[in-house]
Image (tube, rainbow, N blue to C red):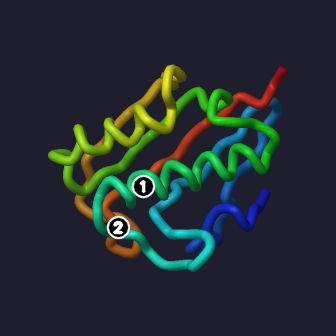
Amino acid sequence: MFTEQAPKPVGPYSQGVIAGDYLFVSGQIPIDPATGELVKEPFSKASEVALRNVIAVVKAAGGDVNSIVKVTVYMKDINKFSEFNEVYSRIFGEHKPARAVIGVAALPKGVDLEVEAIAYLGK
């Protein structure tokens, strides 16, 4: 699947794939879909852009933020965990999907984080 509301893939993969009632959202990095530009600073803004890109793919598949059941976050600097949590909490509100945060050495295009998700689209 594809939506203009999220950045075009930077490689040979889909923004998301529906399998049964589930949507598997590919890792989204902080690229502003309107401009195609990377958002690197501040980290809180980059976090928000990456999360909003995930949500845009979910919405394009017919879901919403509450459809997201699992989030995986890859971060170059795990010391920014608290800063990420502030943005994450604001975006997800009371909805609390299962989540993993993994520290990594490098990410595509030199970004500081990448976010992937699984959403349940069943009724």
Picture coordinates of residue 86, whole percent (x, y): 32, 37
Report the quarter where the C terminus lies. top right
Picture coordinates of residue 101, whole percent (x, y): 33, 38
The answer to whether residue 61 is left or right of residue 28 is right
| Amino acid type at image mark 1 | Glu
Above/below status of 43 relative to 109 = above
- Residue sticking out furthest to the left: 79
What residue is rendered at 79% in x and 57% in y?
1
* Helix, strand or loop at mark 1: strand
The answer to whether residue 46 is left or right of residue 71 is left
Crowding at dot 2, Cα within 10 Å, few <14 / some 14-19 / many 20+, comes out as some
What residue is rendered at 68% in x and 29% in y?
67
Answer with the quarter of the image where residue 117 lies.
top right
| Amino acid type at image mark 2 | Val
Q: CA distance from mark 2 to mark 1?
A: 8 Å
What residue is rendered at 75% in x and 36% in y?
63
Check residue 58 in the rendering and tell me which mark sits there, or answer none: none
Residues at marks 2 and 1 touching, judged by CB atoms closer than 8 Å: yes
* Helix, strand or loop at mark 2: loop
Check residue 111 in the rendering and tell me which mark sits there, or answer none: 2
The answer to whether residue 103 is left or right of residue 56 is left
Above/below status of 20 relative to 104 = above
What residue is rendered at 69% in x and 62% in y?
5
Picture coordinates of residue 59, whole percent (x, y): 74, 45
The answer to whether residue 102 is left or right of residue 29 is left
The tally of labels here is 2
Check residue 114 in the rendering and tell me which mark sits there, or answer none: 1
